[in-house]
Image (cartoon, rainbow, N blue to C red):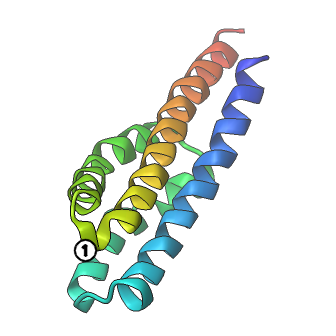
Amino acid sequence: MTLQSKALISGLLTKLTFFGLIIFYTLKFFLLAPAPLSVWVFYMVLLVGFTPAVIKGTPRPHAWLCFVLLIPFIISILNASTPKLAMLGWIEASIVSALFTSAMLFARWQSQWLKAGKHD
């Protein structure tokens, strides 16, 4: 499998899980486990700033997205240990983990592919 195909697949998975996480947070905070609007805004501010980079497919912001994802991951694990929010916490942790992994792989493979193209 070439770097380009790896980057393409991981980029698609990143987009899918990124927008899936935004939808999950919207459903979670408005329907499944209602919370103050400020909580939803906090999560959206964390994610929405990365939307142009995720859509464009630039590798460096994907790496930064992984650092930012540590915050919701920690919160999701704390929620998973709470009996009332356990199921939502595990679902959130799974989506965040998938997004983290695909974004990190995309950042790595896309940057390697771009460097390889510049040296040809």
Q: Quadrant of the C terminus?
A: top right
Image spot of residue 105 (x, y percent): 54, 30
The residue at the far front in this view is 83
Q: Can you tell which quarter of the image residue 28 is in?
A: bottom left
Residue sitting at x 34%, y 62%: 89
Residue sitting at x 70%, y 20%: 3
Residue that mark 1 sits on? 42
* 96 vs 92: above or below: above
Residue sitting at x 58%, y 48%: 14
> Left or right: 90 with respect to 114?
left
Image spot of residue 49 (x, y percent): 39, 64
* 108 vs 64: above or below: above
Q: Crowding near pointer 1: few (<14 within 10 Å), some, many (20+)?
A: few
Q: Quadrant of the N terminus?
A: top right
Task: Pick the residue in front: 78 or 4.
Answer: 78
> Left or right: 98 with respect to 41?
right
Q: Amino acid at mark 1?
A: Phe
Q: Can you tell which quarter of the image residue 117 is in?
A: top right
Task: Pick the residue in front: 45 or 79.
Answer: 79
Find numbered disc 1 in the image and state the secondary structure of the residue it sits on: helix
Q: Can you tell which quarter of the image residue 88 is in?
A: bottom left
